[in-house]
Amino acid sequence: MAVAEPIAASGPSWDPIVRITHWSVATAIVINGLIDEGGSTLHIWIGYGALAMLVLRLLWGFIGPAEARFSSFPFSLSAAIDHLTNVFSGHHKTHRSHNPAGSVMVYALWGMLTLTAATGVILETEPFPVEHRQQAMAQVDSHEDGEENELEEIVEETHEIAANLLLILAALHVAGVAVESRLSGRNLVRGMIRGQPTSRSQE
């Protein structure tokens, strides 16, 4: 699969929708993954908010500006490996959107966020705490209750595993951004805040 062509040394510019969805999802991951890990109302609504931001970002991947579109950052493991090899050997290139390694990480994060959100929605079809749902389930007969509880446990375990993997991927993403920023001489975090990466000489 073709890799996005390199552009000017300053790197890609990020539009407001990309920046808003990025930081909204990042905040949701931190709060729900590290601060409020239970099934509280806050946890549920933050999950819904993250899912809404994901849907918006995926839609933007079709109709947004060039840098935001999926065609600008295709998924390619071989290209990601080549990019990392070039970066660590001192031959860095900028791209019109996410670099190949970043592209793989983006799709991995989106995929895991989708799984986390989907299992969360299955567990909570209404925006109420887990205990309310469990109290309602307690009123069904014992046979049906056992089957539903078994299914619920599977979904809950999947949700927990997906959420933990999402945190791991997020941590790897942050580390990757730090390394890339260091080796390329561009502040990628500032780029996602201001819309345009800056070089060390511009800071």
Image: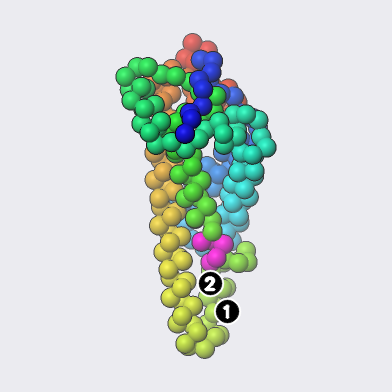
| Residue situated in front as seen by the camera: 156 or 131 | 156
Say which quarter of the image contains residue 102.
top left
Tell me if I can see residue 124 in this picture. Answer: yes
Specify start and end residues of the magenta stretch as a single range: 119-123
Q: How many marks?
A: 2
Say which quarter of the image contains residue 125.
bottom right
SS for callout 2 = helix
User: What predominant SS class does the magenta segment belong to?
Assistant: helix
Is 65 placed above or below 154 here?
Answer: above
Please state the horizontal and vertical placement of residue 147, each as a whole percent of the image.
46, 80
Question: Callout 2: few (<14), some (14-19), or many (20+) C-alpha neighbours within 10 Å?
Answer: few
Horizontal side, residue 77 vs residue 38: left or right: left
Residue 67 forms part of the magenta stretch: no
Is 32 placed above or below 107 here?
Answer: below
Q: Residue at x 47, y 34 (%)?
A: 1
Please state the horizontal and vertical placement of residue 108, each as a whole percent of the image.
45, 44
How far apart marks 2 and 1 lie (CA) works out to: 9 Å
Q: Residue at x 59, y 46 (%)?
A: 54
